[in-house]
Image: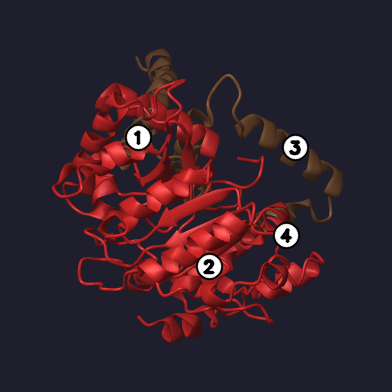
Chain colours: A brown, B red
Amino acid sequence: MSYYEQKDLADFPNITEWAQKEGNKFFEYYSAATGAGKLTEREKSLIALTVAITQNCPYCIDAYTTKCMSLGISSEEMMEAAHTGAAMMAGVTLAHSTQMRKIIKKKEM
Amino acid sequence: MNAREQLRILGQIGDIPFLAKKIREINMFPLCARGIDILQINLGTLCNLSCRHCHVNAGPQRTEIMSKPILDKCLEILSSYPISTIDITGGSPEMNPHLEWFIGEAAKLNRRLIVRSNLTLLLEAPYRHFMDVFVQNKVEIVTSLPDYLETKSDRQRGTGVFAKVVEAMRELNLRGYGIKNSGLRIDIVHNPVGAYLPGSQVALEHEYHRRLLAEQEVHFNQLFCLTNLPVGRYLDYLIESGNFEDYISALCYSFNPAAVKNVMCLTMLSVGWDGSLYDCDFNQMLGLTINNGAPTSIMDFDMDKLKNREIVINNHCYGCVAGCGSSCQGATTAGD
């Protein structure tokens, strides 16, 4: 048995269990934040997919890859988004090396 | 795969509840028709294409063609009752030798007249004149274009098909089809090229309009999103690719009670090439004729028995009630 199972994705709506009020508020917010607004549903789905990949969430990767396909987003567009995410992750990592460099420069003779 | 084998597979869906149970849970079982607004006539399974998703299993090797006596009977019924829409499908309707005559007769009845054409034949002799036949009779054209990307679309329909459809659409645009205020409509059917459900019809329509105009210089009126039902070649594909269980699960988890209220079989009657009657084109391909006491042949047509008949359902019907709902006219709920 794996900790992550595909069928568990179907259990996501049940996270309201034991904390219904907060769970419902989350879904209300989630729905508002991911639905079409100033940004289109396509744009928001690509953002969501990129975040899912960078944050290593198998459920979200499954859900948003499928959603992007459903919205007619091509494999090439999704892969470009993945590279944007990868570049951001690399950039975020290297930006934090500033802290490392700062400390080295302060402490080294 | 024959119809019996398909039904056997559709009856083995593991932990997923049968659709009839889901409909019982929302107190809508049995589903009963609310009249006949659309007469959908399948002129035959003969087609010049063999698309990988085709639920009809249509292709050049098929020989089934609707005969003139059955078409005569359809006209007699249409003349006798206020059925608002005549929806002609196939196969390739153009390959039925009676199509031109039938369109002419049907047009005289002054109803909404639809022909579902793959368009590719319209570029070839002896079918080119159908472009003018469609214009003269104000036929609404519904054509399939699974994706606005050529490579993706051709993966489903065959190499070169996308280019031919686009070429035919350009010619139809020149005749006024898809052009604002021309009175000539051409609508596109989108269905997913793979094992997933269609997305928002509004979002996809916007993207189709934008991409087809910018990249292909093609105009059209409306996009209809259709969910692929696990029937015919699409069922073969699901099984061969190992997607059957996941796909049925996705359909079941997306069950939408609002879509049940608008499902197309409630207002449609489907006529098979041999005159057999069905609740829809998908039931037709599974050999599920109309049941529960209503006549099963157009030759025995009885409006009183048919207009409120009990609909025959099976698990493939999940496809019509998942997500935003699916029908030959696209999504069926406002959530699209």
Q: Do the residues labelled 2 and 4 touch (CB within 8 Å)?
A: no
Q: Name the residue under label 1.
A: B135
- Vertical position of residue B153 compared to residue B71: above or below: above
- Vertical position of residue B103 compared to residue B269: above or below: above
Q: What residue is rendered at 28% in x and 34% in y?
A: B169
Residue at disc 2, secondary structure: helix
Residue at disc 4, secondary structure: loop
Label ID, residue B288? none
- Is A69 in front, or is B39? B39
Q: What residue is rendered at 58% in x and 19% in y?
A: A38
Label ID, residue A28? 3
Q: Mark 3 is on which residue type?
A: Glu
Q: Name the residue under label 2.
A: B248
Q: Position of residue B162 (x, y in %)?
A: 23, 43
If the image is split into quadrants, where does the N terminus of chain B sit?
bottom left
Q: Distance between the residues labelled 3 and 2?
A: 27 Å
Q: Mark 4 is on which residue type?
A: Arg
Residue at disc 1, secondary structure: helix
On the question of residue B120 being in view, the answer is yes
Q: Mark 4 points at which residue?
A: B34
Residue at disc 3, secondary structure: helix
Q: Do labels 3 and 1 share a chain?
A: no
Q: In this view, does B258 lie to the left or right of A97?
A: right
Q: Do the residues labelled 1 and 4 touch (CB within 8 Å)?
A: no
The numbered mark, 1 or 4, whose residue comes first in the sequence reads: 4
